[in-house]
Image (cartoon, grey):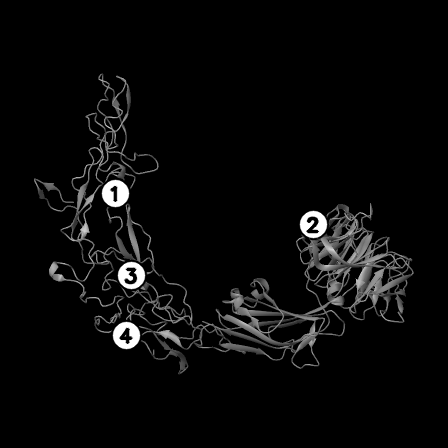
Amino acid sequence: ISTCTNGVWGPCEGEILPQKESCSGVKDGEIPPDTDCNGEVDKTVVNLCGYCGPPPQEICGNAKDDNCNGEVDEGCDCNADCQCSGGDCVCQPRYNQPCYGGPVNNMGKGICKSGLHDCIQINGKWQWTECVGYVLPEQSETCDDKLDNDCDGYTDEGCQNQNCDPTTGENCTIDPECEDWMTRPCYTGSLDTRNKGSCHDGIQRCVNGFWSKICEGEKTPTGEECDGIDNDCDGEIDEGCECTPGTTGECYNGPVPVVFADSNNKSICKKGTRECLPSGKWGECNGAILPVDEICGDKIDNNCNGYVDEYCDCMPGQKRLCYTGNPNTRGVGACKDGTEECTIEGWSGICNGEIKPSTEICGDGIDNDCNGLIDDSVNACGKCNEPCYEKDYTDLSDCNADGRNCNGVEPDPNNPGSVTLGEATFMTPFIYVAVQGKNHIAKLDTVTGQKIWQNPSFGTDPSRTAVAMDYSVWVGNRGFANPNDPNQSNAVHLDIDGNLVCRADVTGICRGIAIDAYGYVWAGTWNTKKLYKIHPYEVDRTQDPPRCKVEAVYDIPIPVYGLAVDGKGYLWASTNAAQTIKFDTTSGKYELVSFLAAYGIAVSPKNGWIWFGSYHKTGCVNAVEPDPPYITHNTNVGCGGIITGVTVDRDGYVWASAYTSTHKVYKIDPLTLTEICSALSPCSPGANSGCDARGVAEDSAGKIWVVNRGGGYANRFTKDCKLEATFPIDPGYYTYTYSDMTGQQLRIVTTKEGYFIQNFDSGYANPQWYRITFDSVVPPDTGLELRVSAANTAGELQTNPTQWCGIFTTSPVDLTQCSFLNGHRWLQIEVKLSTKKDGVKPSISNIKVYWARP
């Protein structure tokens, strides 16, 4: 600040002049201050990376120029990241990789550009070849060619502006904002007091190309002094001077408007107190703290205008170049400066128009990440967004190959090297149980035994459940209290979370429910002797609750006590009549077939026999062959009418549950028609008595579940009739279920399924997965579904894989839509084969995986 005394300016006090830049007192890794005030850091002071201290050490294998010398992984084994240890895993070195042989500070600026080199093996060691095609900076700038020849980020610097006249004193290498002879009006008070009353402008001088921070000669508001002058410049003279003698009040005799100190600002100004004189005029104001000139750098509002340190750094409207990115990227590649504008409180801190580094876009010819290298995101074979490598699986029929698992599939004898559907399997780890005592449905995890949810059945007296292919569940409500009321007797569709999808108004006692190969749901009634065909997806949402679409209703001559669909599309019923029914789900025609006894019903996946319980007609567990002359087969198990639930496991063994007398579960040999083993189904954990073993089903792990009507528990048995665990469903409430409650019958009889799984090891920690191709034969009424996941290790494919990518049904499979697969060394391919008709099967062969690495 310079003070004018007796018309002469005094020395400039408090100024800070440019000084030589240095890293003294600056920590290693930090940028030194711009002490020579030229707008940039002196490159002779900092290391190649633009920081104080020695440059960082080069880190091998990370594909980065750590020490900023323009070379990536110099002196390193350029293929050290290969993790192959034998087998069919082959190291794939990088080639066509960006490089630069000049100073790192010039790389990517002006005419300077990077070249390319390859990683090759020389004398058993992976080494980089010579960098070819890079361009270095020229010795000096060539004027008027509009190019940055010396690659310092500036064009034609040092060249005279031809439109400038130096004889006038104008500096021809810069664009000055002011000339030293200029002045301009200024005023630091509130604008609404300017040129009012005693307030008037001062002048501001241009000094050394910058406007002074001092507004000379201005007159700003002061407190009203009752002197006939508008001292506070508010347009009123001596306002408020009148008062009651002897009274006191707050006062302020400084310039106004002013911001007083409180908890929300840093103003120094405070009000004082004054006493009213006998003349009716206010006396002197005591104790007020008035504004002073703003003191730069103390972070206090000295002039009490609501701003801290205003006009200290710059003048409002002034602009300067700025860049908030890494200083090493400034002016490199696509990166460029923006402009920062001065506000009343100083520089805004907002850099408008700057371009900072972004993710490198391979193949656009631009250095997007501003590291001096163009398109350095090419993969190891120098390509952009294209695979480098191909893994072929030409012989899928070898189920013992590395990383392979065949579950329910087998070699296709008609197509060497391919697999087709074999003995079916299923992978649905749930069981859906009707909690009759509460009119609820419960979903249990068959692996942990934990209950997932229990929700209303939207009817009364639920007993039958059928699990659809999408893992939703259909429920048959019997509605004993009033079977003609659709709020009580109906068929209901719940989604996988137990929410209501729709209700089908199946009036009558609904005691049978099953799903055919095309997803249609069949509901049968006991008292009205009807079959309802329900669409699996179509819903009328104009009604409340939404209604499932009933496609057709058929009258039949028998009451229904259970339903099952075989592999040829025929619907069979359990009944107390003398004959069962064989109903064609396509044509709607049927015939009656004599049998021995019935209650529960299931179909064998091995030979298609229809198995029945023994409750009605007090017989034994028995079967009828599905084709004429419909031969019957009787066992020695469950005789006397004690069996209500039956199922047939994937190996063809028959399981039956006894509701009375024995309360046991039985395993029956279908060839000898005799008991293999049996076990008590206890009421609760550790109990020595049984509680009405009402229903039986096989889970996806091949274990047998028995649901007790009494007690509210379910028991899980091994294949040798050993009780493994007892799980609570809703203790104390009836659980009344004996149907395809795990979905096993639908998946291994009606719609058969099998799985082919192939795990692939890329050998690298950061692969990029592109696509999968395959050949397939998918006849009508069959299906092929492929999905993919990835993991960091082979073990994590089971314990911690990514989410699934897919389902895909045709080749090729585009894996780039699932970017979450990238960066995981292992890939798992799961193929599900299925058929809706016995004797017709799909097949798959010649799977190929296309991938790359950085």
Residue 726 seen in this snapshot: no
Q: Are marks 1 and 3 in contact (CB under 8 Å)?
A: no
Choose between 479 and 57: the one closer to the eye. 479
Which label number is shown at residue 136?
Answer: 4
Q: In this view, does 725 lie to the left or right of 368?
A: right
Where is the N terminus found, in terms of image quarters? top left
Residue 702 percent across, percent down from the top left: 72, 64
How far separated are the C-alphas under marks 4 and 1?
48 Å
Q: Name the residue under label 1.
A: 298
Q: Mark 2 points at which residue?
A: 454
Secondary structure under the numbered disc 3 in the rendered image: loop
How far separated are the C-alphas under marks 3 and 2?
64 Å
Query: Which tag is nearer the camera, tag 4 or tag 2?
Result: 4
Which residue type does callout 2 highlight? Answer: Gln
- Identify which residue is drawn at 75% across, 47% down: 439
> Looking at the rendering, which quadrant does residue 280 occupy?
top left
